[in-house]
């Protein structure tokens, strides 16, 4: 695996890799960033923000200190985007049989993760559709990630979108992409933090979801499906701030729901 140890300890890193049920990986990548850069700082800022949060969740009654989670550190990023896609896919494949949690990083990371995990459905919470065929001459751009996943033949559900290019919109109209919550599927969940009304995200758009609205949607997703893994991406925070703390709380809430609604 192309890994190096994170400089930030994760507060619920309670297990070694072999005995873990959940594996956490940071991917500090912002190679195709097109507006606000800094997604490379997302994994470390989210880890730091988690120290400000209680590991016990009142809603579910789950204490996350008791789950078997191992933080393997961060992916070592190369200069070539094609090489990064290869490294991500090969690294995620090493986590087979475990629940995969990824802290991004720009949204392009989701494509190779999905290729490695091969879920029945991908659910994206995002202010944008990310369905362009190419953006700024790059087919591996963050703006193309859901188009690349669609080409894999995997069922897609995109929720929370409030802005689209004409190309996005035309492609969507002629696709079978849904904007609802599936049921009974093996799902990979990807969350672009611009779905919320937050600053310090890669491409901020006004009018986003509140945290409570997002959490209610995610609770239903986890309750109705088996979550194989998830990512939280497009956090550009350099330190603990509203955006990174919100991302950290989202991470903890999803883990709590996965434990509560665990599919045996």
Image (spheres, rainbow, N blue to C red):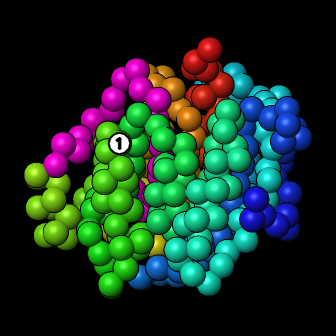
In the image, residue 259 sits, relative to residue 125, either above or below, namely: above
Rendered position, 129 above or below 226: below
Residue 219 visible in image: no
**Residue 247 picture location, percent across and down:** 59, 54
Q: In which quarter of the image is the C terminus?
A: top right
Residue drawn at x 89%, y 41% as measured from the top left: 16
Task: Determine the image quadrant of residue 203.
Answer: bottom left
Q: Does the magenta stretch include residue 183?
A: yes
Q: The N terminus appears in which quarter of the rendering?
A: bottom right
**Mark 1 lies on residue:** 154
Residue 180, compared with residue 248, is above or below; it is above
- What number of labels is visible? 1
Q: Residue at x 75, y 65 (%)?
A: 2
Which x, y percent locates residue 177? Answer: 23, 45
Toward the viewer: 28 or 87? Answer: 87
Of residue 125 and residue 98, the one placed in the foreground of this image is 98
Q: Quadrant of residue 90?
A: bottom right
* Structural crowding at the residue carrying mark 1, measured as other residues with C-alpha within 10 Å and reported as few (<14), some (14–19) or many (≥20): some
Q: Which residue lies furthest to the top in this view?
A: 264
> Relative to the observer, which residue lies in front, 47 or 145?
145
Lateral position of residue 30 relative to residue 162, left or right: right
User: Horizontal and vertical percent for residue 200?
Assistant: 52, 72
* Magenta-colored stretch includes residue 71: no
Which stretch is magenta? 175-195
Q: Is residue 165 visible?
A: yes
Q: In this view, does 89 lie to the left or right of 56?
A: left
What secondary structure is marked by label 1? loop
């Amino acid at each position: 695996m192309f890994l190096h140890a994170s400089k930030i300890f994760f507060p619920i890193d309670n297990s070694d890799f072999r005995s873990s049920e959940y594996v956490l990986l940071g991917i500090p990548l912002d190679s195709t960033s097109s507006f606000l850069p800094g997604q490379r700082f997302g994994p470390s800022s989210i880890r730091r923000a988690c120290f400000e949060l209680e590991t016990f969740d009142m809603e579910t009654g789950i204490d996350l200190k008791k789950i078997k989670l191992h933080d393997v550190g961060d992916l070592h990023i190369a200069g070539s985007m094609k090489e990064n896609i290869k490294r991500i896919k090969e690294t995620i494949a090493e986590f087979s049989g475990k629940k995969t949690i990824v802290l991004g990083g720009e949204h392009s990371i989701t494509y190779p993760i999905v290729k490695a995990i091969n879920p029945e459905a991908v659910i994206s919470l995002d202010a944008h559709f990310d369905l362009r065929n190419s953006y700024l001459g790059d087919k591996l751009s963050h703006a193309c990630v859901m188009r690349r996943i669609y080409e894999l033949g995997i069922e897609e559900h995109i929720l929370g979108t409030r802005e689209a290019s004409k190309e996005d919109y035309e492609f969507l109209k002629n696709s079978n992409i849904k904007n609802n919550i599936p049921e009974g599927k093996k799902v990979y969940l990807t969350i672009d933090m611009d779905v919320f009304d937050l600053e310090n995200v890669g491409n901020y758009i006004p009018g986003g979801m509140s945290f409570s609205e997002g959490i209610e949607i995610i609770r239903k997703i986890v309750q109705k499906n088996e979550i194989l893994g998830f990512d939280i991406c497009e956090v550009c925070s350099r330190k603990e701030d509203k955006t990174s703390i919100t991302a950290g709380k989202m991470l903890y809430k999803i883990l709590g729901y996965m434990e509560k609604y665990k599919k045996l």
